Image (spheres, grey):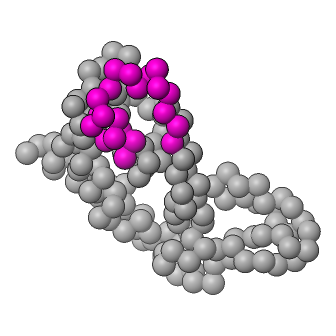
Amino acid sequence: MRVWHNADVTNRYAVPLYEFGNGGCDQGFGGRDLSYRGPLSICPQNSDIIESRLSWDRLIAFSSVIIMVDRNLAKSATLEQLADYIALVGLVDINPDVEVQDVPTILNLFGVAAVAPPGLTVWDKAFLKGLYHTDQSSRKQRWEVELTVSRAASH
């Protein structure tokens, strides 16, 4: 399974931060190569900066997601498991190297040692709820997501 998230840098109102200019730039953001120095070079510009230690001025927004499924790898998964796995990895940029065997999650679908659940688990739903119901510009978003997941796990 391969997942590619195409993303743009935006301000807190989802307005892209790329404007055309002629100054060029040599510092990328989010892994982008912005070293081109031609007359139409693209550089991130944010005219909506609010100086704050409570929020971020630049955010990452998905513009599209591409997911390729290996038929041989997915052979042992049910359609519900596969659909839930694809939904989760499509909605969240998940580090594929993170170990999740001890977590009850559909992300264990293609794991070696763990047993995959039949679909999205309470943990998965709480993670998505926490991620999509918190302010992405808040510097405490990670803590709020963790709190949502821990509350759901304790019930």
Tell whether 25 sits left or right of 127.
right
Q: Position of residue 147 (x, y in %)?
A: 24, 53
Q: Relative to 33, does residue 124 appear above or below in the rendering?
A: above
Magenta region, mostly helix, strand or loop? helix
Q: For residue 54: magenta?
A: no
Tell whether 151 sits left or right of 75.
left
Q: Position of residue 49 (x, y in %)?
A: 57, 80
Q: Taking the image as drawn, is residue 86 in sight?
A: yes
Which residue is located at x 50 percent, y 69 percent? 56
Which residue is located at x 40 percent, y 26 percent? 74
Which residue is located at x 28 percent, y 57 percent? 130
Q: Relative to 31, does residue 52 appear above or below in the rendering?
A: below
User: Magenta part of the protein: which range?
Assistant: 67-87
Q: How many marks?
A: 0
Residue 134, picture quadrant = bottom left
Q: Relative to 92, does residue 20 appear above or below in the rendering?
A: below
Outermost bottom residue:
47
Which residue is located at x 27 percent, y 44 percent? 124
Quadrant where the image shows the C terminus: top left
Q: For residue 84: magenta?
A: yes
